[in-house]
């Protein structure tokens, strides 16, 4: 078993969805006293926003739920390092997944974010809220919270299965 579970959330711009997923998952991990067992990051397949903080609407939505994502800075997916560094590479939607496959990520490393939502029978996309209104961000937050909890439960289950 690896010393740390490595999880990379991926969207297009790395300013709306994946920074929120990163913040929510880090929050759940911290509150489960598992921070030292995880390395968590996020990135985008595009480079338009590299170096920028998350979209103000993502920052605001996270802060309503007590999560601070202001320190995050957008970066672009780096095939040379990220494929090797991360066990779980988690695209927010099918288009992000397609982009990652084109960039050389082996398909078994890729699981759509909402595949971890136990309330869904088939995984759906996390919709891009960038061009919509503020309520889109709250909807995305709720989807991500369910999926992040499912992901944590999944990794916990996998870890125990490997030990037995
Ligand atoms: P994200 O949203 O992929 O959830 O960060 C987007 C943010 C910016 C752009 C596209 C999607 N953009 O085209 O600039």
Image (spheres, grey):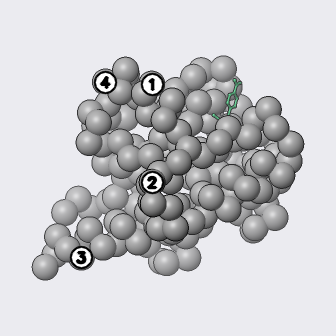
The label nearer to you, 4 versus 2, is: 2
Mark 4 vs 1: CB contact within 8 A: no
The label nearer to you, 3 versus 1, is: 1
Q: Which image quarter has ligand 1?
A: top right
For the residues labelled 3 and 4, the Cα–Cα distance comes to 30 Å
* Disc 1: which residue: 99
Quadrant containing the C terminus in the rendered view: bottom left
* Disc 2: which residue: 122
- Secondary structure at badge 1 equals helix
Report crowding for label 2: few under 14, some 14 to 19, many 20 or more residues within 10 A (C-alpha).
few
Residue beneath the point at 53% across and 39% down: 93
Q: Earlier in the sequence, mark 3 or mark 1?
A: 1
For the residues labelled 4 and 2, the Cα–Cα distance comes to 25 Å
Q: Where in the figure is residue 28, as x and y percent of width and height?
A: 55, 70
Residue beneath the point at 59% across and 53% down: 21
Query: Is residue 69 found left or right of 136 in the rendered image?
Result: left
Q: For this rendering, which residue is in front, 132 or 120? A: 120
Mark 3 vs 4: CB contact within 8 A: no
Residue beneath the point at 47% across and 67% down: 118
Q: Where in the figure is residue 87, as x and y percent of width and height?
A: 31, 48
- Secondary structure at badge 4 equals loop
Q: Where in the figure is residue 152, as x and y percent of width and height?
A: 43, 67
* Disc 4: which residue: 104
Mark 4 vs 2: CB contact within 8 A: no
For the residues labelled 3 and 1, the Cα–Cα distance comes to 32 Å
Q: Where in the figure is residue 150, as x and y percent of width and height?
A: 46, 67
* Disc 3: which residue: 160
Q: Earlier in the sequence, mark 1 or mark 2?
A: 1
Q: For this rendering, which residue is in front, 18 or 86? A: 18
Report crowding for label 4: few under 14, some 14 to 19, many 20 or more residues within 10 A (C-alpha).
few
Q: Earlier in the sequence, mark 3 or mark 4?
A: 4
């Amino acid at each position: 078993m690896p010393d740390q579970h490595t999880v990379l959330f991926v969207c297009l711009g790395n300013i709306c969805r994946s920074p929120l997923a990163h913040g929510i998952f880090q929050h759940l991990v911290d509150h489960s006293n598992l921070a030292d067992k995880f390395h968590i990051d996020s990135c985008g397949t595009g480079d338009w926003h590299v170096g920028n903080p998350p979209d103000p609407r993502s920052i605001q939505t996270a802060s309503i739920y007590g999560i601070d994502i202001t320190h995050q800075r957008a970066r672009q997916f780096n095939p040379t390092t990220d494929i090797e560094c991360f066990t779980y590479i988690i695209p927010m939607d099918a288009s992000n997944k397609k982009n990652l496959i084109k960039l050389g990520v082996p398909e078994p490393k890729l699981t759509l974010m909402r595949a971890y939502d136990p309330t869904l029978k088939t995984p759906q996309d996390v919709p891009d809220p960038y061009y919509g209104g503020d309520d889109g961000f709250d909807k995305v937050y709720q989807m991500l919270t369910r999926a992040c909890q499912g992901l944590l439960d999944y990794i916990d289950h996998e870890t125990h299965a490997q030990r037995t």
